Image (tube, rainbow, N blue to C red):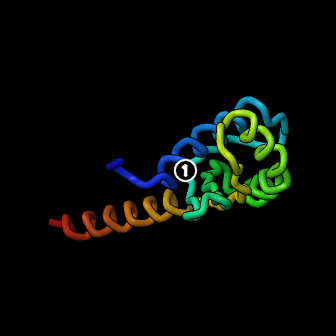
Amino acid sequence: MLPYKRSQRVSDLIREEVADIIMYRLKDPRIGFITVTGVEMTEDLKMARVFVSILKEEERDLTLQILNDARTFIRSALSKRLKMKFIPSVEFSLDASIEYGYKIDSLLKKIRKEDEGPD
């Protein structure tokens, strides 16, 4: 038996390929520093939600809009790279896990500072 499901294997492959397409094939100068952090696939492999982390907070909405506008280009580039019967449709979403991690880290630092206190 395989160690994990096909949808997980395909999502890992799509994550790598979409990151490569964005980095080397998507020629939009408005796109800043983007990291593809993960992909969630439906069980029937028809839909892929790609999670991205965007470095500059003020550029997030614009960059996400650009990526969602380039979905057809990215899907056609995927069709040339992947040997699959059906190429999933792609949707981009902002990954909030990094911000959540920063928030938890700042709370832990605050607690640690309070525990040390004026002693």
Q: Write the residue at 67% across / 50% down.
A: 56
Towards the viewer: 96 or 48: 48
Question: Percent from the top left, x then y, of residue 31?
Answer: 77, 43
Q: Say if residue 49 shows up in the picture.
A: yes
Q: Is residue 108 above or below residue 66?
A: below
Q: Residue at x 35, y 47 (%)?
A: 2
- What amino acid type is highlighted by mark number 1? Ser
Q: Position of residue 55 (x, y in %)?
A: 63, 48
Quadrant placement of the C terminus? bottom left
35, above or below 91, in the image: above
Is disc 1 surrounded by few (<14), some (14 to 19) or many (20+) residues within 10 Å? many
Instruction: Say left or right for 39 vs 114.
Output: right
Residue 54 x/y as whole percent: 65, 50
Residue 58 visible in the displayed image = no
Q: Which residue is mark 1?
A: 11
**Residue in the picture at 26% in, 70% down:** 114
Seen from the viewer's position, the closer of residues 60 and 11 is 11
In which quadrant of the rendered view does residue 28 lie?
top right
Q: Say whether residue 72 is left or right of residue 83.
A: right
